[in-house]
Amino acid sequence: MSGNTPVAEAVDASRFRIAVVAARYNGAMVDALLARVEGELARAGVRKGRLTVTRVPGSNELPLAARLLIGAGRPDAVVALGVIIRGATLHFELVAEAASRGLMDVGLATRVPVINGVIAADTAAQARERCSGRINRGAEFASAALSMARLSRSLRR
């Protein structure tokens, strides 16, 4: 993943309902990522009452939780957060691929933007840099959710 950051659009998010589903696995790093997502959403105007945060065991559970959240409240966008760090087995690749594919499938099936905020890193240091270091992936994920929520609303009119 490059260190390049896309230019964020200015979005008035005061009327958006955003759902965040966050894995408990690698909790400290996911919590740091979540704090950055929440901070960016608040700066854009998302009100506390319009933000739902749900925790799940790990990244493998993110797609189903996103689907359930969409069914329960029809948010304007969902941000799914997790951290997967490569180990000595194929488990890292299996979970990263399953989470990514599952999140994409949920978005396509429901027509609700689902942002893949799963950090898949080779090392814990790489993951920390993206969760709490100089690379602010949390803000990028939040910005992507708001841009896609705005696009989705504009096309439904």
Image (cartoon, rainbow, N blue to C red):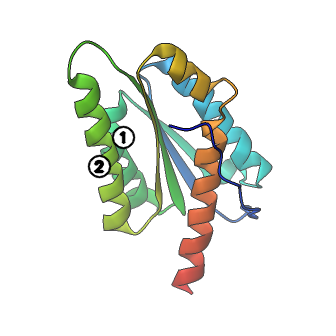
User: 73 or 77, which lies in front?
Assistant: 77
> Which residue is depicted at the point 63% across and 43% down?
4
x%, y% of residue 92? Answer: 28, 25
Indicate the secondary structure of the residue bearing disc 1. helix
The extreme top residue here reads 88
Tell me the mark number nearer the camera, choosing from 1 and 2. Answer: 2
Q: CA distance from mark 1 to mark 2?
A: 8 Å
| Labelled pair 1, 2 in contact (Cβ < 8 Å) | yes
Local packing at callout 2 (Cα closer than 10 Å; few below 14, some 14-19, many 20+) is: many
x%, y% of residue 55? Answer: 45, 33
> Which residue is depicted at the point 62% across and 70% down?
150
x%, y% of residue 18? Answer: 58, 54
Residue designated by label 1: 62
> Which residue is depicted at the point 49% across and 20% down?
27
The image quadrant that residue 37 belongs to is: top right
Which quadrant does the C terminus fall into? bottom right
Question: Looking at the image, is mark 1 or mark 2 earlier in the sequence?
Answer: 1
User: 62 or 1, which lies in front?
Assistant: 1
Amino acid identity at mark 1: Leu
Residue 114 vertical position relative to residue 151 in the rendered view, above or below: above
x%, y% of residue 72? Answer: 41, 57
The tag on residue 102 is 2
